[in-house]
Amino acid sequence: MDNAQPALAPTLAAISDPMMAGQPKSRGLLSDTLRRVARNPGALIGLIVLLAIVLLTLLAPVVAPYDPTRQDTQAIRLGPSLNHLFGTDTFGRDVLSRVLYGGRYSLPVGLVAVAVASLFGVLAGLAAGYYGRWVDTIIMRFVDILLALPGILMVMAIVAILGGGIFNLMIAVGLAAIPDYTRVVRGAVLSVRESEYVTATRVLGATGPRIMLRHILPNVLPPVIVLMTLGIAGAILLGSTLSFLGLGIQPPTPEWGNMLADGRTILRTAWWVSFFPGLAIAVTVLAINLLGDGLRDALDPRLRNR
Amino acid sequence: MGPYIARRLLQAIPVLFGLSVFTFLILHLVPGDPALALAGDRPLSDAQLQEIRVAYGLDRPLFEQYTSYMAGVLQGDLGEGFHSRRPVADSIREAIGPTLQLALAGVIVAVVLGLLLGVMAALFHNTWLDSLAMVIALLGVSVPVFYLGLLLIFFLSFQIQIFPATGSEGIRNLILPGFVVGFSSAAYIARLVRSSMLETLRQDYVNTARAKGLSERLVVVRHALRNALIPTITFMGLQFAGLLGGAIVTEQIFSRPGLGRIAISAINNRDFPVIQGIVLVAGLTYVIVNLLVDLSYALVDPRIRYG
């Protein structure tokens, strides 16, 4: 991957260009895709639920009934009631408020990790597919090595190297997901590399990075968009798993994974302490997966004209 | 088939080499002095740090360190845990059995449940059975492993006491954790088998098989299912790393011994030789499993056997 970076670095800024340029063709794809997603009930439900979760998370300071860190010795391990909809935990903290604030840690982990993974993964995949030969060999062997390690173990190793904390967790989860993007983009590049429009651009004098970013990238975007959507779900799962294991975001910071771990030992007597944070993860990931599946169907050229 | 096996074996070499380099470098990627990383949280004097450097060969050139590390690895010597104070190979040898057992239980659950749901969904395409199978599949990829584990413990161990919540002896203790490990892979397999079978059932040769009077059962088993097996086996091979990871997490939930327990305690204690050992062994296991998967293609698909 390091081999590809220097060549691509100067044109990094150009990545957003073809996407934002708003050529009539890409606008057509966008509105067409939105129309298809809107017609898919599953995807629509996913989108609505996801927007609701994001909104509630953003508005946590306004909608949360209590301070998520305030301990109330008069309200220890109370079951769900009208005062505490999701009950209270061992320290008398309101579980609902903690779940609402928890999204402020769990969701960004997913977003930033996918940004890291897609940036490096897509660049490496473009280089591997476009240049082929030894560049391809080196990048793909590297990908093979990353794929040989369980994602969770990979993230654990990186956390051990970098140390804990939310930032390192984001980086670690992102690094572990790079191979997915590289493989998908490489495959897509291989299928368009020999097309006439690429040859035409080359004949006109365009150089490698320009051809890759301006002409190939927009054409391989659909699978990347699908992968990024589903990838956010995967990254949220992986990030909360690490926190559940005590290796990610540490208590008392409210994060869905570590809240679930908190309630694990008192599951028998106070199920609500872990039930609701887990439900928050499951519903969020389910909503993203529904949306991702809908996007895949909408963007799949084989299904488009049905 | 000989050249096919030889080619697969050769392809594994660069991956194994890269894996060994990555594992070796873990210690050196830690920002700062590797001797300090080895020391972890313990405050050590300069003389003690120098002792560590000499004992672990950190005073020698990197390349020399790698070759001596590899010489040890090839003889089954993974170094000594700085915190655990015992040979890493011994710790891993003890822990890997329960983990592989759990991962294998997960494989069985994934394949059986995945095939069952996938075939059901394809045969009853567009009926409520199809929808039910796909809803289960969607849940499988969305519910976190640790949440599924806790829910099952709550309902099946605490509420109606069918399965034990903890313990690692015998099959009964393997059922719940095995289900937890295999469930998400089962969900993927169900989707894979469903789409592959729907595709195959539309093919001309399936119509031919029906036309010549084969029973529906034979058509499904011999033609449709057989073609769905290749993507399933490929997926299981690629997914094995995921299953191993799932086993590591699941061990924590069910308080089972295994790689998960030593990995987590190694990371908390910053015991790098142990972390290196686990990463190396996990990667090696993955490579071996995928070699076996590639070889099993030859058994399922005659085009590869004679190709």
Image: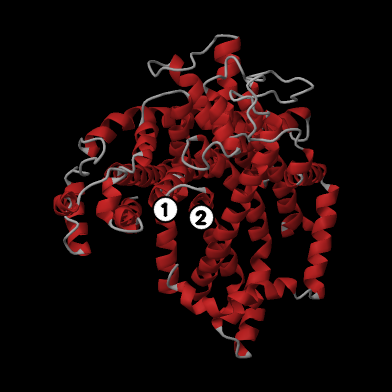
Circle 1 packing at 10 Å, graded few (<14), some (14-19), many (20+), is some
**In the image, B272: left or right of A66?**
left
Residues packed near mark 2 inside 10 Å, few (<14), some (14 to 19) or many (20 plus) = many
Task: Name the quadrant containing residue B63.
Answer: bottom left
Near-viewer residue (B92 or B302) = B92
Classify mark 1: helix, strand or loop: helix
Task: Tell me where residue A115 appears, x and y as whole percent.
Answer: 60, 59
On the picture, is A219 further left or further right than A241? right
The amino acid type, in three-letter code, at marker 1 is Leu
Q: Amino acid at mark 2?
A: Ile
Label of residue A171 in the image = 2
* Residue marked by disc 1: A162
Q: Is residue B224 in view?
A: no
> At which x and y percent is residue B124?
73, 31
**Which chain contains the residue that carries disc 1?**
A
Residue at 74% across, 43% down? A61
